Amino acid sequence: MAVKAVISGIGESKLGTVPELSTLGITLDAAKKAVDDAGLTFQDIDGLILHPAFHVSPRYHIIVAESLGIYVKTLCDTMMMGGASYGAALQEAQWAVESGRCKNVLIVGGEKLRTGHASGSAMMASVGAHNLDYEYPFAATIPAYYALLARRYLHEYGLDESVLAQVAVTTRRHAARNPNATMRELITIDDVLNSPIISSPLHRLDCSLVSDGAAAYVVSRAGTSRDPSREVGFLGIGQAQSYYHMGQLARGHGNHDLVRTVIDVAGQQAFSQAGLTPEQIDFAGIYDSFTITVLVQLEDLGFCGRGEAGDYLATGIADPGGKMPMNTHGGLLSNAHPGACGGMLIVTEAVRQLRGEAGERQIPKVETALVTSASAVASNFSVTILGPAA
């Protein structure tokens, strides 16, 4: 009988502003909570994939394993793809378990983006996704790169900034129902448009938060956890990567360019494996580093037509009580964004929804959850579709 991989445990550290713990401290905290949630011990873990903070050693996965007391491992590595790392790590963990290489793989990431080090978007641009010879010397920051994407999107479809604002309004409606979210006060489109410009056309409320925090999950053989009824199964996973630097990305290739991303390729893989269509998704966890990031993903995945994502969200379909609630924890825009591992919080929220453990924000019936990841200014993507393990 073929081995089936599941998500058996999830964990999060304190989020937001966490001066009392180091980067290692919040990472270990999230890892312990995930392993405890699965009903396992660290001696049961034989695989570890780390999503590291930007400023740590490339061998940090070894340090984390030592700190957790995980001595013998058949998989131990760092996945360094920015915000797309956690989606790729999930697929690698699934492969490791289903091939028999590992029994339980711990995926963990943590970053003190707010209080741990003086990173700032300029530093992150220099180590993240941008050409150090031809792009970075012009002092562009990460918001500036996404602003180029947003400006091109608005130009192509003849739209104004209100369509971007709709994303922030939608996610804040969910954050208002999450007692742990950083920003819970409801906002309007005018509030977004009247917030300070960060890099035109992006306003402050179009940009994700800057937070401390860590998240973790355990991928195991089905039936391994303390309570198999809480295990979450993989229905489909896909990945796709295009060009890395903005100057190259904008040129495009065939059907893809700056505003028509390769997430459609990842989505086709995931939907095909799952045997599902976008209309059959009950919960969407869309990586929301900036409002524009959400719009292009919704369109490229087939939830709506080109240039229509703002109007699609305005119908309320992704709101609390809507047909497909999106980012019910508040997302990176309103819940927390602790660096590149921030998207891991979307996975933990999807697992909670599928387990029926999301409290006030619980969706009444969830059978399918789609989670995306994105990095390097909309060039690296993964799409994961989750559902009940049984």
Image (cartoon, grey):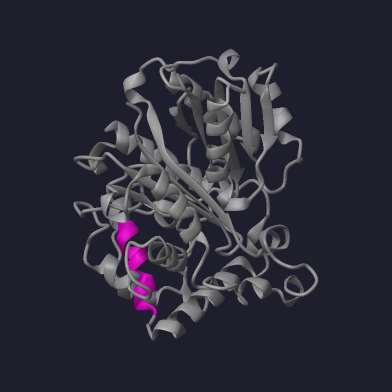
Task: Pick the residue in front: 123 or 389.
Answer: 389
Q: Is residue 173 above or below residue 153?
A: above
Residue drawn at x 29%, y 52% is 174
Give the x, y percent position of residue 13.
50, 34
- Quarter residue 362 falls in: top left
Question: Is residue 18 rendered magenta in the image?
Answer: no
Q: Is residue 106 above or below residue 310?
A: above
Residue drawn at x 46%, y 31% is 11
Q: Is residue 72 above or below residue 329?
A: above
The residue range painted magenta reads 161-172
Q: Quadrant of the C terminus?
A: top left
Q: Is residue 67 left or right of residue 39?
A: right
Visible in this render: residue 16? no
- Quarter residue 388 falls in: top left
Task: Pick the residue in front: 145 or 195.
Answer: 145
Visible in this render: residue 183? yes
Question: Is residue 162 rendered magenta in the image?
Answer: yes
Please, which residue is most extreme toward the front here?
1
